[in-house]
Image (cartoon, rainbow, N blue to C red):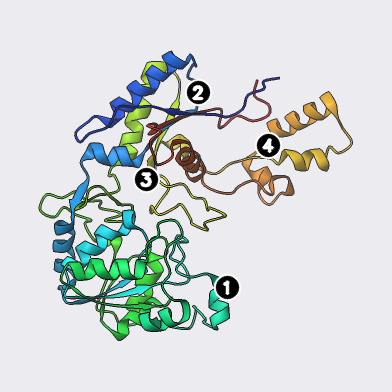
Amino acid sequence: MRTIGTVVRGIRAPIIRQGDDIARIVSDSVQAAWKEAGFAPANRDIVAVTESVVARAQGNYASVEQIAKDVRAKTGGGTVGVAFPILSRNRFSLLLRGMAAGCEKIVLLLSYPSDEVGNHLVDWDRLDEAGVDPFRDVLTVDQFRSFFGHIVHPFTGVDYIDFYSDLIRGEKCEVEVFFGNKVTSLLDYTDTVITCDIHTRVRSKRLLRAAGAKTVLGLDDILNAPVDGSGYNAEYGLLGSNKATEDTVKLFPRDCTAVAEAISRYLCEASGKQIEAMVYGDGAFKDPVGKIWELADPVVSPGYTKGLVGTPNELKLKYLADNEFGNLSGEELRSAIEAKIRAKTGDSLVGNMVSEGTTPRRLTDLIGSLCDLTSGSGDKGTPIVYIQGYFDNYTNE
């Protein structure tokens, strides 16, 4: 019986620069790893590369000034409501500077007790103690401070209320901050709103338009086309962007399916095997201690080959062992379970208890999360992840 199942390897690569052929670099790095580590490619191996280096190779960058120009053109540059930003220096500070540089006044609506991805402004217990209902109560800064004082982020040590306010004022833009969870609250101040939520943006836009907003934008509507030669993303705009320098952001990469297909093609030609490929960003998981969702990108994977489409089609081995084959053991149990796995079809698992508890998530979300945890976001130097045996099961020898 084979003793090894899925194997995941971080693959080191050169430092990627603008203009580099990212698909060729990924292919060459993987082939070098095959030789150095002495493992052989197999059918349905998966190669994944982080979106960050894809965007860098594409030169998909934009400046605060270019963001400001697009915001000014699309909002008129007067009083603009900015709703539900995440609390992140890396993800949002430069975007907010660009908005402020393109407006006369920003009315900033912060969700509470936390932002969309779990960064807390205040704990639920403190809300209960104060008798504050975040689903109903709208608070000014003075009211918020009177209830909860000055709160700093536990990981960054930043008071985001002061930090964001100072960023806006630094661009010679007036600012007013309040707290609430109804995006339409902004319409008491202005009929022009940029809603900055990531995964709930479609609903927020719908609610604003239905309530009579004149101009409604999401982050996906800003820099969805080039401005003065800037980078852009036609589908996601500023969503998925990260701070690159003190005055520029790196946008989410473009044309990622084509990148994945090129990587797959190079490696299939080199190995004679069917190699799947994908581009991945943030994984979709939650920190149980910090309560922060990792998924600040609009999707886990913006591009992948066709072999990665779908969801897992798996049986729950422990359910079979405890129930249908509870009277068996040893080789007899193993043979019965293998026969059951070989007989499975997609239709046979729908609504069937034997598959209950298996994860009904898209393969690209699961694999992308695995890759994000493997490569990390620090100094590992492994922007490429190589996965073997992901599609194997108990019957594979």
Amino acid type shown at disc 2: Asn
Q: Is residue 372 above or below residue 177?
A: above
- Spatial separation of the CA atoms under disc 4 and disc 2: 21 Å
Residue 87 x, y percent position in the rendering: 38, 62
Residue 215 x, y percent position in the rendering: 24, 74
> In this view of the protein, can residue 316 be seen by the observer?
yes
Amino acid type shown at disc 3: Pro
Amino acid type shown at disc 1: Asp
- Spatial separation of the CA atoms under disc 2 and disc 1: 52 Å
In front of the other: label 4 or label 3? 3
Q: Is residue 60 above or below residue 188?
A: above
In front of the other: label 2 or label 3? 3
In front of the other: label 1 or label 3? 1
Tell me which numbered mark, 4 or 2, is placed earlier along the sequence: 2
- Spatial separation of the CA atoms under disc 4 and disc 3: 31 Å
Q: Nearer the viewer, residue 231 or 96?
A: 96
In front of the other: label 2 or label 1? 1
Around disc 1, counting alpha carbons within 10 Å, would you say few (fewer than 14), some (14 to 19), or many (20 or more)?
Answer: few
> What residue is drawn where x is 61% and y is 27%?
5
Q: Nearer the viewer, residue 105 or 322?
A: 105
In front of the other: label 4 or label 2? 2
